[in-house]
Amino acid sequence: MNEPGGMEKARAALFGAVRDAFADMAFLDVAPGVARPLSGDTFSGAVDLLLPPPVSILCIFPAALADKIADSLFTDRKTALEDRIDCLLEILNVVAGNFLTCRFGGGYSARPGLPRIVAEGGGPGGVLLAALDLDAEGIPFRVELRSRR
């Protein structure tokens, strides 16, 4: 990501990774959004990517988006909090894998770590490299790429 134009390529790959994961898993359309505070309860998840330099992807989802994702995946029953968290972790895992493929191609050997829920304000830290304010069918959310150095 240190090559010329590397951050622009990373931003484009991150957007494509999120868009494809949401479309394929939760049947939700994702578009660029407007930066605005996320209202109500939120869930934040992070996954580390073992790259040079090491980076993390952080996703911040409002509870309404977590509910919509879980409802798409568990159509046969009402979802519990545990189910919503599992869905978010799985989406985050797919986003990480998609990002690596979009950014570096299918033959790249780096792999994502295990996705995890992080406490509000307790994300992966590091330097913010890219931030995407997105919209999933009217629900705003945020995805960040952060350096872990």
Image (cartoon, rainbow, N blue to C red):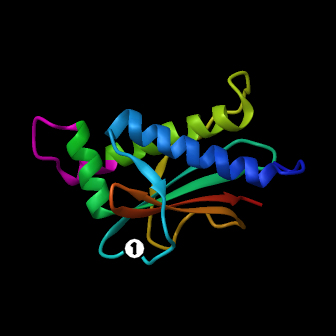
* Residue at position x 33%, y 44% in the image: 86
Residue 25: image location, x then y, percent? 36, 35
50 or 41: nearer the viewer: 41
Could you tell whether 93 is left or right of 101 in the image? left
Above or below for 14 versus 43: above
Give residue 146's position: percent from left, percent from top. 67, 60
**Residue depicted at x 65% and y 31%:** 101
Residue 90: image location, x then y, percent:
41, 40
> Among all residues in the image, which is located at the extreme top?
107
Give the magenta part as a residue range: 74-85
Look at the numbered disc 1 and give the secondary structure of its residue: loop
Residue sitting at x 57%, y 35%: 98
Q: Give the residue pinned by disc 1.
A: 38
| In the rendered image, the vertical position of residue 118 relative to residue 102, given as above or below | below
Q: Nearer the viewer, residue 93 or 68?
A: 68
What amino acid does circle 1 point to?
A: Leu
**Total marks in image:** 1
Q: Is residue 20 left or right of residue 104?
A: left
Residue 99 painted magenta: no
Horizontally, is 78 left or right of 49 in the view? left
